[in-house]
Amino acid sequence: MKKVSFLFFACVVTLSLAAQHDPEKMDAFITDLMNRMTLEEKIGQMNLPSDGDIITGLAENSNITQKIRQGQVGGMFNIKGVEKIREIQRVAVEESRMKIPMLFGMDVIHGYETTFPIPLGLSCSWDMELIEESARIAAAEASADGINWTFSPMLDICRDPRWGRVSEGNGEDPYLGGQIARAMVRGYQGADQSFATNKQILACAKHFVLYGASEAGRDYNTVDMSRIRMYNEYFYPYQAAVEAGVGSVMASFNVVDGVPAHGNQWLLTEVLRNQWHFNGFVVADYGGISEMSNHGLGNLQTVSALALNAGLDMDMVSEGYLHTLARSLEEGKVTQGQIDQACRYVLEAKYKLGLFEDPYKYCDVSRAKEEIYTPENRTVARRIAAESFVLLKNEGGLLPLTAPKTIAVVGPLANTRSNMPGTWSVAANLETPATVVEGIQAAAGDQARVWYAKGANLTADPVLEANATLFGRSLGRDDRTEEELRAEALAIAAQADVIVVAVGEASEMSGESGSRVDIGIPDVQQRLLRELLKTGKPVVMVLFTGRPLTMVWEDENVPSILNVWFGGSEAAYAIGDVLFGKVNPGGKLTTTFPRHVGQIPLYYNHLNTGRPASDRSFEKYRSNYLDEKNAPLYPFGYGLSYTEFTYSDITLDKNTLNAGEELTASVTVTNTGQYAGKETVQLYIRDVVASISRPVKELKGFEKICLEPGESRTVRFTIGTDLLKFYNSDLEYVYEPGDFEVMIGGNSRDVQSVTFVLR
C-alpha cells in the first residue's frame, strides 16, 4: 500500500502508534501544520460537502475536485466504494498544497451491507455485548469500503411515537440509552480508542440535543423544554457517549431555549465543552447552518458566524463557513482564534485516526472483497435479529409452531426483500435479503408446505404507499381489487393448519420525515386480519414496525403477535428461527405502546400529579381520561417468552444506607416453564420525597440472564448514592436523604418493591 511521507509537510516526522496518542506530540504536530496553513485552508478543513455518488474516476473539471485541490474540503460523506474514496483521497494528499487527508463519513446506522435490526429494535435486546458487536462489525465492513467516520449512534430520547425517527433511537429511557451509547462507541471506535487498526472508525453522537422531543412528533419541529428536564431526562445518553470517548457530535435541527442548536453557545460550548469536557469536534447536520435562516436568525453570513461563535466546528453542506467566514473575520464578527480552534479539532480527529501517517489506511481494496457481507457477519446478524424480537402475545401457547403440515403465509410484507433491513440501510443491497416466505420455508424444511398470498396492499391509498416505499423499496403494488387479493388469501388459508400474516409498516413509514398522525396498522391490512381470523384457523401476526403502534383491536383478537421491527438483512431467517422455537424470543420493549394516539406522550418514568390517576378506567377529579384507560397497551420493559419466569421476594442486605456506602438488592428468578429462555431482570428506583417532584420510577439497572427449565439464579444489584442522584432546581447533581423504593421485575409495570432509608 502506498503511504504518504511527512515530507509533504516539510517535516521530518514519523508517527508511531504511541506518538499518535501522545497529546503533546499531537499538539506539536497540529500546531506546526496550522502555522503553515492559510486562512482559506483552515476554513476548508471546516467544510463538509456531499456530492453524492460522484464519480467513477474523478472528473478533472468537477467542482468538488477543484475545491479539494484548493484545500477547501475537510471531508465528504455518503460516497460508497473504496476505489472512489481512494481516488478522492489521492487528490487531497497529492494534488493540494498542504496534502491534508480527508475524512469520509456515511450514515452507517445499523450495519453496512450486513445490516442489523433498526436501532429501536436492537435496543430491545437489552444486550450490551451484542449491541457492541453489531457496531464492531458495522465499523469493520464500512472501513473495508473506505469509510472512516459514521454518523451514529443516534441518542435522541423519544416519548412520541408519531415521530418517525423514533426508529433510529434507543427508546424512551435515559439510563438504558446511556448504556447503549457506551456500547456503540466502543464498537465503532474500539475499546481502547487507539484506532490501532483500520477496522475502527470515528463515531458521531447525534442529534445534540432534544430532537426527539419535537412538538406533535413532527420532524424538524420546535422543542420547548425546561433545563431541569433536559438534565434529568434527555442529556444523559450524550454525556455517556462523551465519557466513552466519542470522537464527534452532531448538532440537532431543533431550537433549544428558542435558539437553534446549531447556533446555541450554551449547548455546544457551556454544556458540551465546559461541563462535559468533550474534546472531539462538533459537526452540523445536513444544511443545519443555512437552515437557521428559516428560523429567522439572519442571512447565511450571520448564521454561519453564529454557529462558529456557538462552538460548531464543521459545516455540513451549507458551505456558509467556506464562503462567509473570511468576510466575518474582517468585520470582527468572528475571531481568528475561533477559526483556529475549529480547524484544530478537525485535524486532531484525522491525527487520531492515523490518517497523517497513512492517508490510505482505509483504502485497502482487498479488504472490500473479503470482509463485507461475509457468512460470519450474516450469522451474527441473524442471531442478533432474533434477540431483538418482542413476543407481545401468545394465547394458548400457539408459538412455537410444532409440526404444522401446511402454513399459509399472507400479507403485504410477506414477500418483500427490500423492506427487511429497515430505514437508513443506505449501504445495503436491497435485493439480497430473504423474504418472510423464504425464511419460514427454510425453518420448516421438508416438514411443511408453505403457501403464499399477498392478501392486501400496504394501504388502500396508492399515493400514500408510494410515499412509504421510497428509495427502491417498493412492495410491488398489486392492481387487483382489495376483494380479489383477500379472496386469494382466504383460499389458501382454508387449506392451512396455521396462518402467519406479515403486516404493519413499510420500512420508510418511519425514519427521517416519516412522521405519522395515525400510528395504527393501515385499515386495509386490518380488514385482511379480520377475515383471516373468521376462518377459525390459528393466526400468528408477524408485525413489522419502526415505532410503537396503537393495536388494541389486534391485541384483543389475534392469538399470537411477534414484533420483529425491521430486523436487518437476516431478519427472515431469524423470524423462522423464532416461529419454530429454534430461538426463544427474549426481547423487551424500550418504548411504551399506547392504546390510543390521544395518550401521547406516554412513558413509564413520568411525574405524579396532585391527583394521581387511579387504576380504574374512569374516576372523576383524577388525572384520567373520560374515554380511554390511562394505562398503556404494552408497558416499557415488556416482552413475553415461550417459557415462564417467577420472581422471589426482594431482599436488601440492609435497610439504611449512609453516604459513601452501598447496599445490595437481591431477587431469585426461576424458569418454571418448559423451554430454556432469557429474561431481562430490571431494577427501578423511586425517590419518594425530594426537593423537586421525582418520577414514579426510574430504570437504574438490568441484567439479562439465561435459564434452563427449572433453573434458578439470584440476581444482585448494587445500589450506591450515585444511582440516587438527580439535578435539583439549581441544576446541582445531588442525592438527598430520605425514603427510597426499590422495584424489581420483568417490566416496568409488573414489579415488587421494598424500601430503604438514605441517611
Image (cartoon, rainbow, N blue to C red):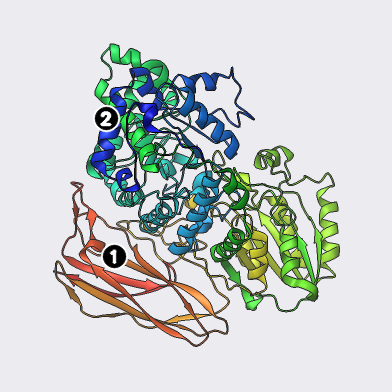
On the image, the x and y values in percent for residue 26 come to 28, 38
Q: Position of residue 412 (x, y in %)?
A: 73, 53
Q: Tag 1: Cα neighbours inside 10 Å, few (<14), some, or many (≥20)?
A: many
**Kind of residue indicated by mark 2:** Thr
Question: Could you say which is closer to the camera, residue 160 or residue 273?
Answer: 273
| Residue matched to label 1 | 686
Residue at (72%, 43%) from the top-left corner?
474
Separation (CA) of disc 2 from disc 1: 51 Å
Q: Is residue 756 left or right of residue 550?
A: left
Residue at point 50%, 37% (across, down): 2
Relative image position of residue 99 (x, y in whole percent): 42, 27
With 344 as the anchor, is 422 left or right in this view? right
> First in sequence: mark 2 or mark 1?
2
Q: Secondary structure at mark 2?
A: helix
Residue 31 image label: 2
Name the foreground residue: 338 vs 344: 344
Position of 305 relative to 737 (above/below): above
Kindly indicate the quadrant of the structure image that contains residue 13.
top left
- Other residues around mark 2 within 10 Å, as few (<14) / some (14–19) / many (≥20): few
Secondary structure state at the residue bearing disc 1: strand
